Amino acid sequence: MKQFCGLAFLALLLNFLTCDNAATRGEIVNLKNPNLRNGWSMNNLSAQNEENIVNPDGSDDVTDEEGDGEALEGQNGSPEKSAEPKVHAQEEVNKESLKSKAQNAKAEAEKAAKAAESAKKNTLDALEKVNVPTELNNVKKFAESAATEAQKQENIATEAEKKVAEANGEVVELQKLKDEVDKAAKKAKQLQLKAEIAEHAVKAQVAKTEAEKAQKDATTAKEVAIKETGTSKSENVTKAIDMAKKEEEETKNQASIASENADKAAKAAQEEVKKEIKDENKEISQLENEITKLGDILNTVKELASNAEDASKNAKKEMAKAQIAAEVAKAEKAKIEAENAKLIADTASKAAEDIAKSSKAAQIAKNVSAKAEEKSKVATEAADEAANALNEAENPESKIDDVKKKATEAVNAAEEAKKEKSKAEIAVEVAKAEEAKKEAGKAKVAAKQVADKSKLEKAIQAADKASKKTDEASKLAEEALSDLESLEKETGEIKTKVNEIKEKVQNAINAALEAHKEKTIAEITVEVAKAEEAKKEADNAKVAAEKAKETAEKIAKTSKSTEKITEEVRKATEFAKTAGDATTQAATEAAGDVSSEEQNQKKMLQSIKQKAESALEASQEAIKAKTEAENFLEIAKEVPKAEAAKEEAQKAATAAEEAKTEALKIAEEVNKSDASESEKKKIETAANETAGEAEKAATFAKEAADAAKDTNEAVTLAVAKEKVEKALKAAKEAKKANEKASYALIRTKKQYALEPLEITSEAGYNITEKEEQVKEEIEEQEDKASEEEEEDTLQTDQTEIDEVDISVDNEEEEEGAADEQSEGEKDTPEKEAKEEQASGEQILDDKEAHKTLAEKFKDSNPAKTEGDKILETLISDVGEDTLKNMQQDLHQYFKGK
């Protein structure tokens, strides 16, 4: 505004000087022209003066017009008088006027030169702030040349003014000097305007550049605001983002306005800028016209530059708002970070306490967690205060510094909170290292116990390594704890120290893990050894089971026990293979590298343990299968006994059935004969008794068969033995029943043979025939007994079992029974003979009959044969009553003769 007022004042002053210059030229003309001195042409001169004194800006101000008019009026008022004294007086007045005007012109020249110099300086200063467009590339040279030339014109005006002041010559000479001063002043003014045009054009460019910078800063602020907020959805953050986006758009608009005006200013100034600055000899009127044009150009450039500057200011204002939004976003981010740091530090404190409640590391974690909470409060307060600026739209430039300060305070507090969080986190790690040290100690003890118990070389080596790693872990954990205590009090940069502690903690944990690893290796070694031992046992069981199978096949190829043994052998073989596979897998895994991670160690050990357990279980199953095979082998040995008993019982039952059939046939024949009813009754009773014993023999034979079957199907040796015993017992009972049936059959035959007959001359033949019949029957019994003995011997040879000799056992029992019966048999004839003598009757002696039968059958029936034994037993079983009856029958027979 001051520049504008100064320019207006300068224009008025130049107008004044121009008018004075025109009036002076009129006076000089009057002095030189007598006609004019006579006054005839003054009116034209006055009119000319009035035209010439009009200001370049169109105003009607005049300078020294009244004085000039009075002089002219005096001349016109007395044309007849002599004007000589007045002329001299007028000349003096004109000289003084010219000197005064020259001084004013000189002053204007000085002022213009100074203005040009100031414009040059401002231009040069502005040029340092911007990159001027192409058309203004020479603006610096232009401004410098204008200022330099203006200074020259000032010097010219000064010199001319001095000459005017010192001149004592004619007015004409003074007028020339004054014109020289005026011209220099005009040129200086012209150069001043050119310099100012350049200055304002450059200022417009500065405004454009600043507006563009403001636009970039606003965009940057918006991006910062968006970046800093992250995923936060808080009210202040949302508001800051919206504001940053809005102000960026406003800044862009204002920058566009500034750029447009600056470009127009540059274009308006470019015609002058590209012109060469030189001193041309122009008339004052030409200079005045050029000054007028330059003034118009300057005004245009000024207005455009002012618009650009206003737009730039607005852009800066909007940019400040965007920056406020960005700072608020920073503060909000710092606030959130501080809160997170507080939460993490608190979590870390609890974690450290959970790991090792009474440890120093846990206490340190608790302390730094409290500090983090304090810093979080500071950050929150600072961020909230910064956010208040979002609601104050006026004078954002004045608030940006305060907002930045609060944002910085929040950021710094957040950084401090994060430091404390880092301390808390590393405290947790140190606590872990302390616990790892303890666990390593346990691993060391466990590894030593495993090594001492197993005495395995590999386990002992692993225990030694575990001990060394435990010592290393302990040392590193203690160092880490000491460093943590120092770190707690640290207020500066802690990143390096934290990393150092982390490294020590990690090394301590690694050493502890190595100790665990070596303990695991020791345990794995033991498990693999167990698996290998289980494999050996399973292999041994398999071999034993195979042998049992071979033996069983030799003993009884048809026995079901043999099939069971084969199945158990298959199982034993399968389990032995399973044990071998599990052992191989366990050994393969154990041969691999054991991971340093505890979880992987546990998995590997568990896997090897499972395989070792599988091998052990398979071994136990193989041993069990071997035991079962051996059990079935023992059962198989019992089966032939039961089968032999079954055969014996079956033979006895068959013989008894044959005796039954024969006895019933005899009874039927007697029943059809003329025998007495009593005799028929006796024979029928004997036959029925034979049939009953035959049925018993059949029953016992079935029991023996069932017992043999049960023996074959038995799954335990005890049951098999029980069933064999039952079969043997049933066979024995069947044989007894068979024997009784045979005795009953003999009795039947005896009754049949001794029934009363009519004696003819062929009686001796009949007796002989009966004896032959008895002999034949006895021989048949002997033949059957002999056949049975041969079959028993053959069966025994087939089964190759020495224990099974049922026939021999029975023979011994029968020999004992025969001896007892022989004694009774000896007593019975003697008793019967005495009774016959007491009765006084003459009868045949039954003793002699016995002797006769014995002598006749002696050669054909050796005593050692089974038939002889049976005969003796049968005679013994006849008993006292039977012999008496037989004696009576014989007595009646001979008495009748």
Image (cartoon, rainbow, N blue to C red):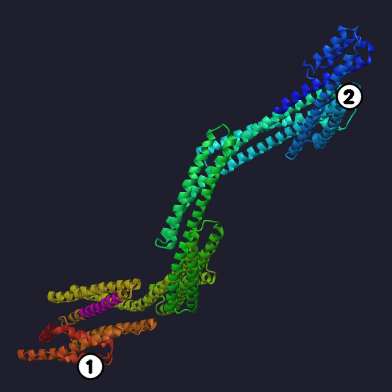
Give the answer, above or below, for where 426 lies relative to 41: below
State the quadrant of the C terminus: bottom left
Give the answer, above or below, for where 354 lies relative to 452: above
Give coordinates of residue 530: x percent, y percent. Answer: 45, 74
Specify the label residue 32 is tagged with: none
Residue named by callout 2: 174
Secondary element under disc 2, as helix, strand or loop, is helix
**Amino acid type for the residue under numbered disc 1:** Glu
What segment is highlighted magenta in the picture? 721-745
State the quadrant of the N terminus: top right
Query: In which quadrant of the rendered view does residue 701 lie?
Result: bottom left
- Magenta stretch holds residue 95: no
Query: In which quadrant of the rendered view does residue 849 lie?
Result: bottom left
Q: What is the crowding at mark 1: few (fewer than 14 residues within 10 Å), some, or many (at least 20)? A: few
Taking the image as drawn, is residue 577 in sight? no
Q: Distance between the residues labelled 1 and 2?
A: 215 Å
Q: Which residue occupies the foreground of this view, 615 or 798?
A: 615
**Amino acid type for the residue under numbered disc 2:** Leu
Taking the image as drawn, is residue 504 in sight? yes
Q: Which residue occupies the foreground of this view, 235 or 144?
A: 144
Q: Is residue 127 left or right of residue 634?
A: right
Q: Which residue is drawn at 45% across and 79% down?
A: 455
- Dominant SS in magenta: helix
Residue named by callout 1: 855
